[in-house]
Amino acid sequence: MKASLKCRYDVERNGAATTIGLSAGDVKLRATLTDATLVKGPSLNGLALAVEKPGFFIVDYNVPKKDYRFQFMNTVKVVGKPLNLTYIHGQGNNFTTVEGTLVFNPANKVSANYMLGSSNCKLRYAYVHRGQTTFEPSYDLSKNSWDFALSRKVYDDDVFKAIYQPLTKALGLEWSRNSISNGSFKVQSYISVFISIFGLLLSMSCYVVCLGYFI
């Protein structure tokens, strides 16, 4: 039996979460606790339990809300290419999502995500260049908007990623590491491109004014 411990801190929400995992053969057990579980004495707030068999199913249970979430995975062949299918159903919010990813080769794959009974549908294409750089454009049909992501693998374990959302003019920057020897973490931040460009132009204006003053 193997055990794992993962910690996460969200600066924007000012909250922390800890996940404890146990592996028993092909099945994994997880318990997630947030700061709400421990603040003001132990409680069930923020406590979530999960049972997972990788590649087959995941069952999540939100203890305080008494809410189940089921996820089932399977792979079929389409014209000799693997199509990875995922079925997700949430009991509390009563939603059902179907996801599919068609892998043409290790460098090219296309995926789609659709929520049944709604107009929420997302399409994504991923291209991996020489196993190091990944370019991912995606299109959201409900919002009629594009998102673009570019990631680069560094030193085998580290990945730097940039995400641009034209609809909100937001730029996301992410640094993640997944290593058995050096540990795992993810740091993510979003900034407004408009504010960044305005700040850059303001700095350049101040520099020009100061330069003109001294000349």
Image (cartoon, rainbow, N blue to C red):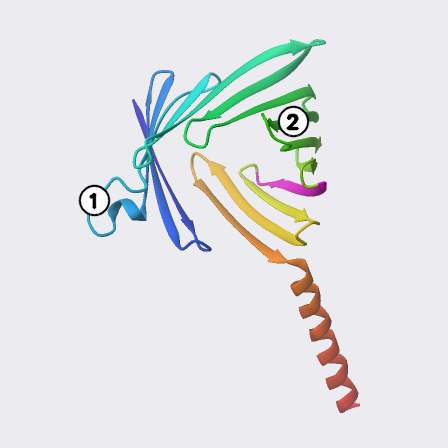
What residue do we see at 25% from left, 39% from top? 44
User: Residue 150: within the magenta?
Assistant: yes
Where is the N terminus found, in terms of image quarters?
Answer: top left
**Residue 31, located in which quarter of the rendered image?**
top left
Q: Relative to the observer, which residue lies in front, 122 or 35? A: 122
Residue type at mark 1 is Pro
What residue do we see at 75% from left, 84% from top? 209
Residue 24 — which label? none
Q: Percent x, y for residue 189?
A: 54, 53
> Which residue is at the far left?
41
Q: Are marks 2 and 1 in contact (CB under 8 Å)?
A: no
Q: Relative to the observer, which residue lies in front, 141 or 134? A: 141
Q: Percent x, y for residue 194?
A: 69, 62
Left or right of residue 98, residue 184 in this image = left
The residue labelled by disc 2 is 112
Q: Relative to the observer, which residue lies in front, 136 or 62? A: 62
**Residue 198, located in which quarter of the rendered image?**
bottom right
The residue labelled by disc 1 is 42
In the image, which residues are magenta? 144-155
Number of dots carrying numbers:
2
Left or right of residue 44, residue 156 in this image = right
Left or right of residue 118, residue 204 in this image = right
User: Residue 140: within the magenta?
Assistant: no
Residue type at mark 2 is Ala
Q: Percent x, y for residue 106?
A: 67, 23
Of helix, strand and loop, which one carries label 2?
Answer: strand
